[in-house]
Image (tube, helix red, strand yellow):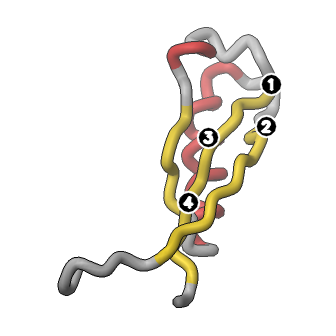
Amino acid sequence: IKGDLMGRVEYKIEQVQWKDEPESRLVQLAEHLNEFAKDGWHVASVDLMAHTSFATKQLPVLLEREVGQ
């Protein structure tokens, strides 16, 4: 970061869903996150502790990215 000015950021929450294949859920999650990254989004938060068994078929992910000044 140059100087002490930071760019503005925007946030969005996405519901990441996966196929019912327990052995590949982390791989599927990473694939979704990589798709968001292609659009400039960074993961600000994902709560895996509340879903350790991944019993749910969707997981909320908080994303952020810098926006133009």
- Work out whether mark 2 precedes mark 4 in sequence or the reverse, and give the earlier one: 2
Tags 1 and 3 touching, CB below 8 Å: no
**What is the distance, in whole Å, between disc 4 and disc 1 at their CAs?**
23 Å
User: Residue at label 2?
Assistant: 17
**What is the distance, in whole Å, between disc 1 and disc 3 at their CAs?**
11 Å
Q: With respect to residue 36, does 47 lie above or below?
A: above
For the residue pair 42 and 69, the one nearer the viewer reads as 69
Q: Where residue 28 sits: x, y (%)?
A: 64, 41
- Work out whether mark 4 precedes mark 1 in sequence or the reverse, and give the earlier one: 1
- Work out whether mark 2 precedes mark 3 in sequence or the reverse, and give the earlier one: 2
User: Residue at label 1?
Assistant: 57
What kind of residue is marked 4? Glu
Where residue 2 sits, quadrant-wise, is bottom left
Q: Secondary structure at mark 1?
A: loop
For the residue pair 58 and 46, the one nearer the viewer reads as 46
User: Residue at label 4?
Assistant: 64
Residue for point 61% across, 45% down? 62
Tags 2 and 1 touching, CB below 8 Å: yes
Residue 29 got which mark?
3
What kind of residue is marked 2? Gln
Q: Secondary structure at mark 2?
A: strand
> Of circles 4 and 1, which is in front?
4
Q: Where residue 68 sits: x, y (%)?
A: 55, 88
Q: With respect to residue 54, does 2 lie above or below?
A: below
Tags 2 and 4 touching, CB below 8 Å: no
Q: Where residue 60 sits: x, y (%)?
A: 70, 35
Residue for point 50% across, 59% down? 42
